[in-house]
Amino acid sequence: MKRKIVSLLLVLAMLATSLLLATSCVGNGPAAGLSEFEFDTSKPVTITFYHTMGESLRAVLDKHIARFNEIYPNITVEHKQVGSYDDVREQIKTEITVGDQPNIAYCYPDHVALYNLALAVQTLDDLIAATNTVTRADGTTEQLGLTADQVDNFIDGYYNEGKQFGDGKMYTLPMSKSTEVLYYNKTFFTEHNLSVPTTWEELKAVCAQIKEIDPNSIPLGYDSESNWFITMCEQLGTPYTSATGSHFLFDNEDNHAFVKEFREWYKAGYVTTQAISGGYTSALFTKNPAEDGNCYMCIGSSAGANHQIPENEDGTFKFEVGIASVPQANKEAPKVISQGPSLCIFKKADAQEVLASWLFVKYLTTTVDFQAEFGMASGYVPVLENVTDNEVYAAELAAANGYESLPLLATKVCLEQANAYYTSPAFNGSSTARDEVGKLMQICLTSTEADVDAMIKKAFKDAVAECKYQAGE
């Protein structure tokens, strides 16, 4: 009851803020007086940007802020590392209630859904479509909005994430992305003539082969139980969630069936997960293969490739790592999860702040050199198809191997599967659904209940009930 009261108070505060914003903003447009989209380059304007970047990434950002200021010297960009992604969300959630939110922020879809309880996030459709020009400091001009070529240059799955909120409108542009990939011990696979699995059936067969070769191993580690569940729903075409109407749809017989199947994998000793093993399964993957309990495959984030490098203390390597796409239910219609931060712009009463924010977001998301340099520094995947126009990045990708340059090898796989990315519906409560299906997977894999079907049904029912409770339904 206490959680419901706190949630209700927050919603009421954010709704009150939405009324305040509505008095200073026109409809879905950025702010009063912005219908002409005229940016005054003679007027100084300061914008703030909240993010989670560490020192090395801030260095890349600062370098490109300087380049951006050469184009628009009247725009001052103040950026702040707030902490984790959740810290960014919590600080902005509080600031929105008093109308003191930043201009731009790193965001995940459920963050945007939360901010939109106060109607605080600027829709981007009109800005993207704007055809008028803005004059740069050197006298040249650029189209305020995105050209057709710029839109086409985004990896489609990353770009379309900005429209997953149920109303068809665009709320974000992609900043940098990650996905899941299959890391495997290439040395072991070559030695034993094992094929890299491309489907879940093939993966099960490979796990059985590995178990025969090394009975003391756990063939597969899967870092995210939540991603595993959500990916199976997407690949199989079974209901998970919806941004509109009834939100929590994952309690159905088809989903019960794949969870029951993976329980059998766990009972056979084929797989473990982050929650079950007590930590990221990269720790098991990078162990000496002679040790008990090691993994020969690991499904984890492409952004975590540095943690999958099996390096010895003396700088040598225990084995060579290979990377492949995650297994598929249907190879003809592949589906791979899209993750990583996007950028959202917040509504402001001053139209010039919104336009300055848009120009900066446009710069970060469409500039090849920034995307390439940020990708090399972060291990995240650039969001542009032509990122290899950056010669340094292209050379680094070409030289990627299964040893010290594993992050770039992961990026190569991510870019090769660009047409497979999907995102889940975003709404206030979508993060709870994600958490609950992860817990559900852990319970169903490890339960010792005799009646397995009844246990699985109860786990699903309880997960949906918790989702509804957290959402105040």
Image (cartoon, helix red, strand yellow):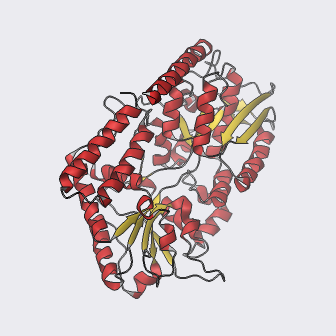
State left or right for residue 220 relative to residue 9.
Answer: left
Q: Please report the residue visible at 64 percent of the width from the left and 21 percent of the height from the top.
A: 98
Q: Position of residue 212 (x, y in %)?
A: 30, 83
Q: Nearer the viewer, residue 107 or 253?
A: 253
Q: Nearer the viewer, residue 348 or 160?
A: 348
Q: Can residue 322 be seen in this view?
A: yes
Identify the image quadrant of the N terminus. top left
The residue lying furthest to the top in this view is: 23
State left or right for residue 159 relative to residue 452.
Answer: right
Q: Quadrant of residue 361?
A: top right
Q: Where is residue 388 in the image (x, y as percent from the top left)?
A: 60, 60
Q: Quadrant of residue 245?
A: top left
State left or right for residue 347 relative to residue 319.
Answer: right
Identify the image quadrant of the C terminus. top left
Q: Please report the residue visible at 61 percent of the width from the left and 80 percent of the height from the top.
A: 312
Q: Quadrant of residue 105?
A: top right
Q: Please report the residue visible at 50 percent of the width from the left and 26 percent of the height from the top.
A: 6
